[in-house]
Amino acid sequence: MDIEKSVREEIEDVSMGRPHVVVLGAGASRAAFPRGERNGKRLPVMADFFETAPIASALGRAGLAYSGRNFEEVYSELARTPGSAETRTALEDAVFAYFSSLDLPDEPTIFDHLILSLRPKDVIATFNWDPFHIKAARRNGHLGGVLRLLFLHGNVLAGHCAHDRVHGVLGAMCSRCGQQFSPVPLLYPVAEKDYETDPAIHSAWQAARHAFKNAFMVTFFGYGAPVSDGTAVELLRDAWGGWQQRDLEQIEFIDVRQEDDLLDKWRLFIHTHHYEVHADFYDSWLAHHPRRTGEAYISQYLDARIIEYNPLPRTAGFEGLWAWFQPLVAAEARAREAEERNRHASGLDK
Ligand SMILES: [Zn+2]
């Protein structure tokens, strides 16, 4: 078969201005670290939270049956139980402490690959509390710029200045007022999710809605769209506009669940044909066309060209990985410079 768009052409093409939005759920962290993170600590999902994270003792004398139960159910029950405020605080502290203690290994991980595979125009919106996204953004940010990270349920490393509405990393200073960022509270899984009250979470959702409206592609990576979080699914669906309003855009799932289950949940999102399901991140558009998913998608589906894969080197160390990404980043810089020259020439920068 004749390749009509080569890797070389793909690298030079940076015509897509719209964002690729990646929505991450607990399944992504588990997929990244099936045998645990840097120190072997395991990544829980709601269904096995009490078995996986060492937090059960915080339930203390509350006398709640938690064994084998979903964290969300137990927490919601606790929230409804009168006089349980102390137990709830103890549980929340234990969860915060556990997620704060998680760390990335020294070698590149899925999170590094994910961050590097996206451009500054793109967005990661995550439901996860763990610190992996921010840590990966920090250690790769020197290459190709930093994209937007939105924490839809809060995060142990996220900070916020409510006064200036600036998001940042906990421990750093707000660039406007010079005050330290306040922590963003973790949003605990009660049945009725409140995405409005906390200013940091509210603004993350606003930004997520905006990104969804403009996205050409949305990747759901390990996000279970739990029935208990109908609000989240509704908010995302409204922003996406439902399949009737979408023509070309693509939905991609990276998930180990059965395709039928996924489609059932996401029916209203999906245009008749434009979705794909991959069990493995390394089979996704992101891993096959890093930093060029939009351009590759247009070439394949709009221009009907046969395009060559440009898979990222998943086993390379950091030096090799960054060297591999260098030509992509350089092409982006050249495109930006050319754009600036054009703007200058046409007098638009005055
Ligand atoms: Zn400030």
Image: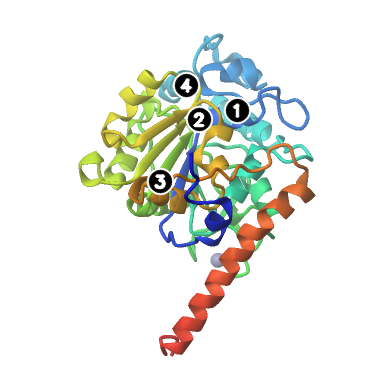
Residue 160 located left or right of residue 233: right
| Nearest to N terminus: mark 3 or mark 4 | 4
Q: Residue 296: x and y, percent?
A: 46, 49
Give the distance between the C-alpha atoms of the residues marked 3 and 4, in whole angstroms: 51 Å
Q: Is residue 54 visible?
A: yes
Earlier sequence position, callout 1 versus callout 4: 1
Q: Residues within 10 Å of mark 2 (few under 14, many from 20)?
A: many
x then y, percent, for residue 248: 30, 46
Q: Residue type at mark 4?
A: Leu
212 sits to left or right of 244? right
* Residue wearing tag 1: 31
Residue bearing the label numbered 3: 300
Q: Quadrant of the C terminus?
A: bottom left
Question: Which amino acid does the dot numbered 1 rest on?
Answer: Ala
The answer to whether mark 1 and mark 2 are in CB contact below 8 A is yes
3 w.r.t. 342: above or below:
above
Q: CA distance from mark 1 to mark 4?
A: 30 Å
Of 125 and 195, the residue lying toward us: 125
Nearest to the eye among marks 3 and 4: give it. 3
Q: Quadrant of residue 160?
A: bottom right
- The disc placed on residue 222 is 2
Disc ID at residue 273: none
Q: Is residue 152 visible?
A: no
